[in-house]
Image (cartoon, helix red, strand yellow):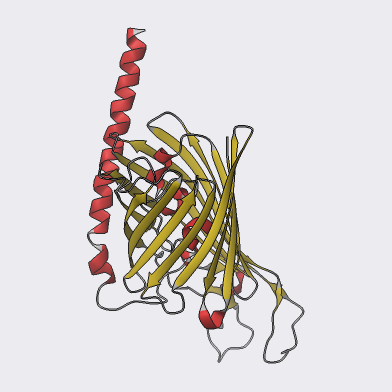
């Protein structure tokens, strides 16, 4: 028994040591992002843009301010450190009809391992229906069809280093498929979550998509090479066109959240009413800095109304949404809806469902 106790304590100490180092790595990574991005916005210089499409109707309706809220299965996308806020097995999924018949889907599962740590797995995809290829010679269709299929699969782990501070990391595989070409790489998300102890004020941050470059390869890039056009009948070997590598859409996100009404330690006590406000700042490597504001009202943790506003965006500002959560036989089920107006691009709706066991 003594050996078992000693082994468990050594294992816990080792785990805490690793997570502390991850927190230090997060700080180190975040420092050079400003210089990496500096000077101009660098729009269109990053690959795997589908990674920037957020997960979950609840965060979307709150103006995408979730890094410091991070208390449901959507935290796998926003901040892996939030896994430690979930005390039971949770499964969630969301579906979004994006622009121009493009579909975005997200699914995740969180499994608590103990009171201080937990695991998560997530899948994010972007796809299109098959579309016919058109050319100058065949503007009505060449009889060949193409589609786009992008996917990111993540495995997450988070641990409480103290009762107030948690660290989490997600390792993910990313792949883009465009017709006959594809690109893939690996990346990390590293997040922290700090409870200040002042009226549920939380300070959190996350670095997303820190990893390798994406470089398209495929059979359409193979062409015959005519070594000498002055000689006929010579051997023409295959030549491969080389595409340029592009970095991932690296983003540093820092946020605050607080319960003004309700919750466990509100500023104002109001019984069954809760009002949470959140603020996120984003520093991407392929765009300008942005600030998001979000708010959620809850009645008895059953009915929810949400609103958000996004500053310094081209075509999106206000976000709206609602949700309902029920307890059926000891199992929780929640359904959320979000609506965002992208002006000339049209309105986008998202629906999510989450189950707790």
Between residue 101 and residue 224, name the one nearer to us.
101
Q: Quadrant of residue 255?
A: bottom left
Does residue 54 appear in this view?
Answer: no
Between residue 43 and residue 134, name the one nearer to us.
43
With 235 as the anchor, is 19 left or right in this view? left
Above or below, 122 against 349 in this view is above
Does residue 125 appear in this view?
Answer: yes
- At a point 26% along the width and 58% down the height, the residue shown is 30
Q: Residue 183 placed where, x, y %?
A: 52, 63
Q: Quadrant of residue 218?
A: bottom right
**In the image as oriented, which residue stretches furthest toward the right?**
143
**In the image as oriented, which residue stretches furthest toward the front?**
270
Q: Quadrant of the C terminus?
A: top right
Q: Residue 216 placed where, x, y %?
A: 51, 68
Q: Quadrant of the N terminus?
A: top left
| Count of labels in the image | 0
With 257 as the anchor, is 134 left or right in this view? right
- At a point 37% along the width and 66% down the height, the residue shown is 292
Above or below, 17 against 207 in this view is above
Q: Residue 164 placed where, x, y %?
A: 28, 38
Q: Residue 248 placed where, x, y %?
A: 41, 64
Above or below, 222 against 150 in this view is below
With 335 as the anchor, is 242 left or right in this view? left
Between residue 210 and residue 344, name the one nearer to us.
344
Between residue 149 and residue 199, name the one nearer to us.
199
- At a point 41% along the width and 59% down the height, the residue shown is 295
């Amino acid at each position: 028994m003594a050996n078992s106790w000693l082994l468990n304590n050594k294992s816990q100490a080792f785990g805490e040591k690793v997570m502390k180092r991850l927190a230090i790595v997060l700080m180190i990574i975040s420092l050079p992002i400003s210089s990496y991005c500096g000077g101009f916005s660098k729009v269109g210089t990053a690959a795997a843009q589908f990674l920037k499409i957020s997960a979950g109707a609840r965060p979307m309706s709150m103006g995408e301010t979730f890094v410091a809220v991070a208390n449901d299965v959507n935290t796998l996308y926003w901040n892996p450190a939030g896994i430690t806020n979930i005390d039971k097995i949770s499964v969630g999924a969301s579906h979004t009809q994006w622009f121009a018949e493009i579909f975005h889907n997200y699914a995740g599962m969180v499994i608590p391992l103990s009171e201080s740590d937990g695991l998560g797995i997530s899948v994010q995809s972007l796809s299109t229906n098959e579309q016919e290829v058109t050319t100058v010679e065949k503007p009505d269709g060449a009889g060949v069809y193409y589609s786009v299929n992008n996917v990111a699969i993540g495995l997450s782990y988070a641990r409480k280093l103290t009762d107030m501070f948690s660290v989490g990391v997600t390792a993910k595989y990313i792949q883009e498929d465009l017709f006959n070409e594809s690109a893939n790489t690996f990346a990390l998300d590293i997040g922290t979550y700090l409870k200040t102890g002042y009226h549920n004020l939380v300070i959190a941050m996350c670095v997303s998509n820190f990893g390798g470059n994406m470089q398209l390869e495929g059979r359409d890039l193979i062409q015959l090479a005519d070594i000498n056009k002055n000689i006929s009948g010579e051997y023409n070997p295959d030549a491969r066109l080389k595409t340029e590598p592009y970095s991932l859409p690296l983003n540093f996100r820092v946020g605050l959240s607080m319960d003004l009404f309700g919750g466990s330690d509100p500023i104002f006590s109001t019984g069954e009413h809760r009002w949470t406000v959140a603020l996120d700042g984003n520093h991407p490597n392929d765009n300008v800095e942005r600030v998001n504001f979000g708010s959620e009202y809850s009645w008895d943790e059953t009915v929810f109304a949400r609103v958000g506003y996004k500053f310094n965006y081209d075509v999106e500002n206000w976000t709206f949404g609602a949700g309902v959560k029920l307890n059926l036989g000891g199992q929780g089920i929640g359904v959320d809806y979000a609506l965002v107006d992208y002006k000339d691009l049209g309105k986008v709706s998202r629906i999510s469902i989450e189950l707790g066991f």
